[in-house]
Amino acid sequence: MAAELTAHELIARHRPTLDQALEAIRTRAYWSPHPEHPKAYGENGSLDAAAGKSAFDALLGTRLDLGQPGTDDWVGGELSPYGVELGVTYPHADADVLLPAMKAGQRAWRDAGAETRAVVCLEILKRISDRTHEFAHAVMHTSGQAFMMAFQAGGPHAQDRGLEAVAYAYVEQVRTPDTAEWTKPQGKRDPLALNKRFTPVPRGIALLIGCNTFPTWNGYPGLFASLATGNAVLVKPHPRAVLPLALTVRVARDVLTEAGFDPNLVALAAERPGEGIAKSLAVRPEIRIIDYTGSAAFGDWLETNARQAQVHTEKAGVNTVIVESTDDYKGMLSNLAFSLSLYSGQMCTTPQNLLIPRDGISTEDGPRSYDEVVADLAKSVGGLLGDDARANALLGAIVNPDVKARLDAAAGLGEVALVSREITNPEFPGATVRTPVIVKLDGAKPDAEAAYMSECFGPVSFAVAVDSAADAVALLRRTVREKGAMTVGAYTTSDEVAEAIEEACLEECAQLSLNLTGGVYVNQTAAFSDFHGSGGNPAANSALCDGAFVANRFRVVEVRREA
Amino acid sequence: MAAELTAHELIARHRPTLDQALEAIRTRAYWSPHPEHPKAYGENGSLDAAAGKSAFDALLGTRLDLGQPGTDDWVGGELSPYGVELGVTYPHADADVLLPAMKAGQRAWRDAGAETRAVVCLEILKRISDRTHEFAHAVMHTSGQAFMMAFQAGGPHAQDRGLEAVAYAYVEQVRTPDTAEWTKPQGKRDPLALNKRFTPVPRGIALLIGCNTFPTWNGYPGLFASLATGNAVLVKPHPRAVLPLALTVRVARDVLTEAGFDPNLVALAAERPGEGIAKSLAVRPEIRIIDYTGSAAFGDWLETNARQAQVHTEKAGVNTVIVESTDDYKGMLSNLAFSLSLYSGQMCTTPQNLLIPRDGISTEDGPRSYDEVVADLAKSVGGLLGDDARANALLGAIVNPDVKARLDAAAGLGEVALVSREITNPEFPGATVRTPVIVKLDGAKPDAEAAYMSECFGPVSFAVAVDSAADAVALLRRTVREKGAMTVGAYTTSDEVAEAIEEACLEECAQLSLNLTGGVYVNQTAAFSDFHGSGGNPAANSALCDGAFVANRFRVVEVRREA
């Protein structure tokens, strides 16, 4: 079958974007080809808001037939955190049929080479980008993110992370030339001469285990890194967040087909409630790469048991912000208030422990006691979320009952500085919407430690009173070392304290945001510039995105012969 | 203490070499800064043959005091495979004292940055290079390699592999800039602007577990990759091959001191007989990287148990050569004879299974039966090793009693086509020197399979009769998949057969040498050009040297603040 899309055509279309991405990961300056504003869509084949909404609505209650081999049933039962039954069913796969079928196209995909694979991936991302409005609703109604966040984080930001992974994968593969002539002098004798050919080869089939809260953002890096390095990719979405990844798989299969490759290079593995197929898939010999975002318990299980695979995990962590001093008290409070509120604290990057000296902090307007700082922060969060419409737009919905249960329990852990408030979402009355709770804890009290030294994923923060800046740094170190952290924040006007915090982050390997008071938040990272996680503490064994994230997804096979 | 060697000075001295190495790993053309010829040494501060021999002789019977903290005893008892007691003793370390001391200098080493670390590593390699003659004797009298091989493989080739690792480590670290200014447009509002600083940070302490046969060649890549990426390195040599790595550690400590760094960034962990300290060191929390060459059993143990560390292993494999047809029968035989004989087959890259069609092969002079091919190969090996002086120079000595026992047992596995011959080494009467044995096996007989499907490390080859070229390729695939392979060789004049073998190697991930009939051998790889192993089959989980070998030895920590 002749390809509708030739490699030549795709290279002409996407090579400039790839080159810009390659330049961006070198300079780490701001760059993105994916517009953040909803109104930027609607031209050149992309869906505008209305078309995207219609496309999403048209999916509801349908069977998403991907044409996959080995489909032995149809499964699905996603209930939107906004209370809507999606009613979409997906193929349930017989792995003994699907996995062998996924290997059939690998040779052609391998032989296509790194550049063709990269531009095919970019075409997939472009088609997803064109449907960002549709994906936004799918992300919103699986993750519980508010629309604007689902649009941006689930759309352009996720596409950026996917493109970034393609760029890293491409450059890693072309570090070694396709061929080399090797001529070694032998004094007076003839030189030794060899012709060498180097081929990047895939490891096999990669398994992407998706998460509930950021199905695309956390899923795309692994998916595209594996695909761009020649592997087939089996996508196992979180059972509550299948739709965004199922749509992604559909687009990928369409593009692969049009470009003349086997669509089974990308496939979906949806599951029945409670089936837990990740566990059995993860240890199959065909699976040679795993990307996983989720609980520490299952991440640790994968690292221990899926020994036949390269396992990339993002697990739980306890994120800390040290509040020691500031010269922009209001800016600090509003920045922190936003960080705690965004998506109801359901980000792996949301601060949990705010370490504040029990003797208070200094500000541009004089000292503030510990109690005042906590009260002012509570007031700031309260103000930010005082208007229900704005609160709904910022908080989104509680993603699942576990988060709600933790939130409810948190009030019993200490003195509540900010009570969680129930908010009604007029458009989606079934949504569970809650403002964050802030609980005061004494860092010196052993019984408080159990609370602040565990991840309490959701809209729960602890204002932990510490003895001093040095005490805060020591606790930060211990927290990162023992529990891991995706992010660390700090507010200080002291060079000495800043240096101590920086040194702690360098030694314990955590990403640090210092004195953020404006429109950048500790829980947000930008592709091509910021690393997401460090890969060097217990919260995650890899970082998005760097050389290590892609380098072991393929190997280079050399064939040499005499010249 | 002011450094005797400033970074500036070292950069001026070594940056050109680093740049050449960086260029070589990009082009993979031939390059080496380390001369292979013994007579090339003796000027510009390097030791000539006599001075190197004297330096080695002066070491015998001495205590090699490295000035390490935590030294609680002196241990050592190396018996050269040539029969000489070395009598050198080495520091035995109390890990509870030594490991913390190794961390003390890490901050300064980290802060020195990638370029300074690279040139310090190059200075270490330069000093080792100057003492290549001394190291050659140390390698010879621990590995049992003949002098010329110990000189080349243990000297310039090992130094090349170390330099190659430094180059990969350097380029990996400077992929991310030190700083970035990130400015994100916000429409009509002021842009968001951040200053970002990126610092490569080490994982911690790396453990190098050395091997008996190639202490420097197999040890230098991991040692220098870890050191160049900011880690401290604890060197745990094989108890029979301590001296070459102890000398290496001494040079490294001297250079670090002179360059103003803590010498404890590199330390030695020698052990008492039977102490087995690798097992306890490998699981200590301070150890975050392990490089290991040796048995599959212990390599698997490390991968399973040293979960706190990045584990790089080179283990056992079963190397195959397919002999299907040739247009240079003599060249093929002499090339194979050399490969089987070099260092008595005690290389991880030596061919073990020669797969030959039972109906024979075609050559430029007509067909040769299976029996004729095996007999001709036996004759070729016999001719190559017919002269005892040449045999000694090529074979070296049997490295340990296990190899000897396997060689003795091999004759009982099938019909012996070439009997192993005992050779006297007039200079070292205590040496155990044996020519290779070639045993005929029928690939179709299940009882033969146990022999040819296991690694029989040493001068033992199996001439395995197979039904056809297709049968050979199928057996090759199965062998690589189940047992792993560091090398694959093949002789064929058929494009079709060559393609099938290439495809098998691409799919099973093994490095292939095709139709070698001249002075390059399947068991030799050249740094900067050839990959050693693929990292994609059971013989090794990493390749020397590529991005994956270095990328996870450090992490990048980002500190960002508002501009």
Image (cartoon, coloured by chain):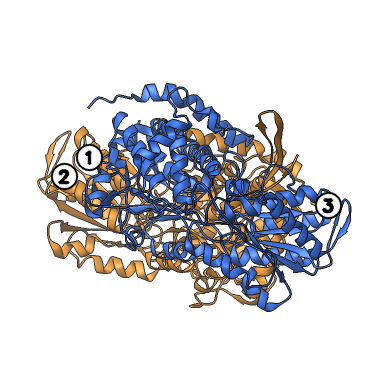
Chain colours: A blue, B orange
The quarter of the picture where residue A224 lies is top left
State the image coordinates of residue A152 (x, y, percent, origin top left). Answer: 54, 39
Looking at the picture, does residue B56 appear above or below residue A189? below
For disc 3, the marked residue is: A493
Callout 2: residue from which chain?
A: B
Q: Provide the secondary structure element on which disc 2 rests.
A: helix
Which of discs 3 and 2 lies nearer the camera? The answer is: 3
Q: Is residue A294 left or right of residue A343?
A: left
Instruction: Confirm or deny contact between disc 1 and disc 2 (CB under 8 A).
Output: yes
Label 1 to label 2: alpha-carbon separation: 8 Å
Residue depicted at 28% across the width and 26% down the height = A3
State the image coordinates of residue A195 (x, y, percent, origin top left). Answer: 37, 32
Of residues A115 and B125, the one nearer the viewer is A115
The quarter of the picture where residue A479 lies is bottom right
Callout 1: residue from which chain?
A: B
Of residues B45 and A90, the one nearer the viewer is A90
Residue depicted at 81% across the width and 62% down the height = A372
Label 3 to label 2: alpha-carbon separation: 73 Å
